[in-house]
Amino acid sequence: MRLTDDVELLDGLPVAFIKSLDAIVVADLHLGYEGVMAKQGLFLPKVNLKKIFTIIKNAINKTQAKTIIVNGDIKNEFSKVDEEEFNELFDFINFVKQLDVSLILIKGNHDNFVDRYKDPFKLKIYQQEAKLGDYLFFHGEELPNDLSSGVKMLIMGHEHPAIGIFNKAGKREKLRCFLFGTFENKSILVLPAMNYFASGTDINMTNKSDLLSPVFKRMNVDEMRAIATGYGSTMDFGTIYMLREAV
Amino acid sequence: MIEFAKEPYPDEQSLSVLNSYVRDWFTKNFNELTPPQKYAFKLISEKRNILITAPTGSGKTMSGFLTIISRLFDYSLKGKLEDKVYCIYISPLRALNNDIHKNLTKPLDEIYDNIVKEKGVEIIKNNIKKVTIGVRTGDTTQQERHKMLVKPPNILVTTPESLAILLNSPKFVENLKTAEYIIIDEIHELANNKRGVHLALSVERLQHVADSRIARVGLGATLFPLEEAAKFLAGYDDGKPRDCIIVDASWSKKLDINVISPAKDLIYTKEDKIEDATYNEINDIIKSSKATLIFTNTRSGTERVVFNLKRRFKYGEDVAAHHSSLSRESRLEVEELLKKGNLKCAVSSTSLELGVDIGSIENVVQLGSPKSVTRAVQRFGRAGHSFKAVAKGEMIILNRDDLVECTIMLDAALKRHLDSFRVPQNALDVLSQHIVGMSLSDKWDVDKALDLVRHAYPYHELRKEDFVYLINYLAGNYVGLESRRVYGKIWYDEKENAFGKRGKYTRVIYMLNLGTIPDEVAVNVFTVSNKWIGNIEEEFLTKLKPGDIFTLGGRLYKFEYARGMKCFVTEAQASSPTIPPWFSEQLPLSYELANEIGEFRANFSGVVSDCIKESKIKTIFGKKSAVPKKADEFLSNFRINDNAKSAIFGYFAEQLYFAKVVPNNKLILVEFTKDVSSDKSYLIFHSLFGRRINDALSRALAIQLGEILDIDIGIMVSDNGFVFSTEEDIDIDKETLDSLVSDVTSGSIVPMLKRNIRKTELMKRRFRHVAARSFMILRNYKGYKITVGRQQVNSQLVLNAAEEIDPNFPIIKEAYREIFNDVMDLPRAEEILAKIRKGEIKYKLIETPVPSPFAHNLVTFGHADVILMKDRKKYLQSLHKLVMERIKSK
């Protein structure tokens, strides 16, 4: 689905493609999630990394993009580097290398310690935010700083947005979604989480005050459009306000 | 071979197996041998495996213990009694453990005192020790545990879970090697569930470490088939059941029970009057007997009865309630008062059905149907404390279906037709626990381990591939090599065909998470706008489908969705609930009993049909109508009062006049009709097979019908049938029904049901239980308890991820097995579908302007709540009036 002349949301994938940068952008991979959970007594089968590989391969095939921008939270653990995380991060970086695309990381709240891989893996890592072309990429746990006129669109992750809807039998279903709206006169795009296990927060069923990012203290989330992704397609479901009413 | 004991042994022969001190003690304290003792003393002295079933007060415990005590004193007198465990006693109830300890301490003391008196100094010279007994449960303090390790008791009294822990205690297990006997009490409470399956494996592991063969003694109330219980007790060897002899003394107590209908006409007699009559009846019974025990089936019912008895007849502290929601202290107090004979009447939901000694009860009253013959026999067996007493009791019924059900139930009880139980087979989650447990103490050859597991009856047919798949799962082989250090609880070497323990945390994980009873918790109910309303039981939530309407705190709510341990609802505009409350407490009707009721329906409807042909309608439904002679004669074969006869006859006559047909066990009546108070169409299946079977049947038929007609269908399931409802304008003709039935009976319904169940709350919760039992999500990790809510969220992640890997992942497979075999009765549902296909069970479609009399309780059961009793009655009356108008206008 085409969002602007320059930005496309790839059908059925939690991935945005930015033509002018020749890059795909994703967020919240939380690599190593299963391993970290296993240490807390929950022995999840490992599927996250495999699923991420499939999605990214798919997205690169479709777009022939030359760059992947990970908009924060590439890994899961806050305070330290888990061994399992390290392994998956390593696998991920190798995977990207094999695809022959370059990797740009924006640091998120879970990404302390990522720095130490910067040199060995020749990674491009930005602290907090990065202005690339017309776009300001930031993870979202803090407000964006650079709101200069050169920035046309803000792109963030962090919130793991989704919408909740009821099917005909009264069963509630959750769909991951992009949120698209306006922040301080600039357009803003919130990316859905890529992590397999993070099915997301259904924004239309959640109190505004319970949202994570400080961004939503400065803007009305209800005015944003929810663009849901899943089941092989990506569709505009209208504003959060309308979706709240529908529930 | 499994065989039934035939002739009891003469008393002299039974007593001759005891050593003289024990014999003297016994004859001094008891005048005679009770029926089970006449078999047990001798058989246990031969170290046979023996299963004894007998009612309360029949000296069951002594029959199991006395020979063993005698044997231990033999050792003692020879100076050979060591500080080792010789006998292990296991009961599922901690309270019972304390009871046993108390009850055995006295004889052990007295017998030893006599020996001391006679032998004097020889005691020290010849090292004649006292036989000791000790209790080990979850309540045992660290200090006591340590003491027990240093000086273990000769008779160890414990629970299934504590036994499993002891088996993995490297030091204590040394003390168990000398075990010669194991007594499993309350076997009927264990054989039909996973707790029992867990125990069966523990017993085989115990046998594996023991130096010699352990003789097994099973004690229990009546159950059927006893052969199944004997296999469970004795286990298997070389693919065949081990020898076991069954002593069935369950019927040594005579039953004197009657079914009472409080009114002749159960439809139009005002509910106040029925209530008055019921309580007066109960009060008469209480007044005329020394102590009365009343069973009500539900906790709310228990409270209501106690309240009413006190209010109406001014009872004080001599009437008391006993149910599982009360604190342990108040329950113990009631039990004590009963034992001392200080209570006139105790009212219980189910909690006093089994277990602890409650002294002398003269009369048992059952309100409403107990739903199973076995349960009825167990409950009424509570009356009359001595084995020579007669168990006196009354079943007071509350509606016409209950009446027919209880009449047949009582008849079946007197004919000793019990309902059957099954031991769950090949439960993979329980097996996971034991594989981990086994690995903690040893390195195992896979085939040798499989051999041990197959000794246990619940696994005697376990397939090797399932076993190996489990080992692979436990070894963490579903994740990459580098992660197995964290995921693996055991190591598995395929080449070496061996497995063993892995990692330093595994022992801790095992000890903290062992057991089969899932963490259940109250589910909080909120409106979708997040206002808290109250809470419901978790098991109740699993029954809810979106759109279901239920009562909570006297108001109606529509279920919308659940999130973890929260349930979200909206206020419902409907006039009645679609699902009865306390669902989890309501016991399903057993298949055998359902079948007998079906036979009764077939036979009695023939009689009634003759009566109708011979007389005019006025003589049957008129004001002064009496039960015709033929029908009266037929009903006189049953133990019911005159009111009950009138009510049953009226019920059948109405159905025959109105619908021309009474459904039975060979004929499913399918009735297409409309609701009188709304625009709903109903398709009613009069399939009297019990709720567990109807659950499976109704889902399969509803899915298929939904596809044929392309509509959403609401389902209400009960024991006597199920009802489909829709607000769409539909028409069901014979062709539609024929093609529906042929679709559903032509192949397996399993794939269809799996798809249907996959998305339900039932699956989510059962999967959580199974995943927790299989150590895939831990309930307790490194000393931290993980809340049920967290477990629930986690289990959904696991379920999704496991399905990505393999839809037949052992944990998923087991969750389906549990739902299909333990919650529902899919095997029998499939049998019934096969019979329909072959024409052995027929079906017949009728269209009725209003629901036929036999459908009334099916379409109104949603009103079954106490609070709504009056509404329900009103609705029922309106239905009945419509039917009678039709009959009379003909």
Image (cartoon, coloured by chain):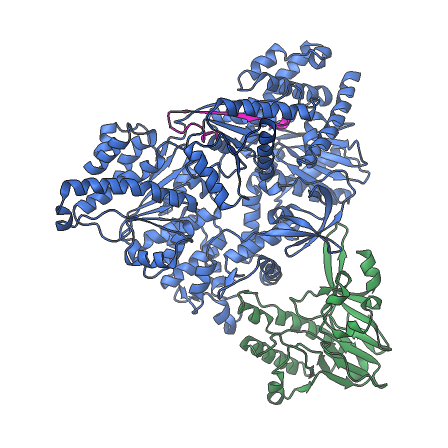
Chain colours: A green, B blue
At x 36% / y 60%, what residue is drawn? B169
Q: Is residue A235 left or right of residue B156?
A: right
Name above or below for residue B300 compared with residue B775: above
Between B812 and A126, the one lying in front of the other is A126
Q: Position of residue B771 (x, y in %)?
A: 54, 57
Between B246 and A183, the one lying in front of the other is A183
Q: Position of residue A17 (x, y in %)?
A: 78, 77
Q: Position of residue B865 (x, y in %)?
A: 67, 36
Q: In this view of the protein, can residue B685 be seen by the observer?
A: yes
Number of marks in picture: 0
Which quadrant of the rendered structure holds the N terminus of chain A? Answer: bottom right
At x 29% / y 27%, what residue is drawn? B32
Which quadrant of the rendered structure holds the C terminus of chain A? Answer: bottom right
Q: In this view of the protein, can residue B346 be seen by the observer?
A: no
Quadrant housing residue B70: top left
Name above or below for residue A77 compared with residue B333: below
Between B201 and B845, the one lying in front of the other is B201
Quadrant housing residue B384: top left
Quadrant housing residue B616: top right
Name above or below for residue B306 compared with residue A133: above
As for residue B389 lying within the magenta part, the answer is yes
Q: Position of residue B403 (x, y in %)?
A: 60, 25
As for residue B48 lying within the magenta part, the answer is no
At x 80% / y 80%, what residue is drawn? A19
Q: Is residue B422 left or right of residue B631?
A: left
First to last magenta residue range: B380-402
Name above or below for residue A229 compared with residue B554: below
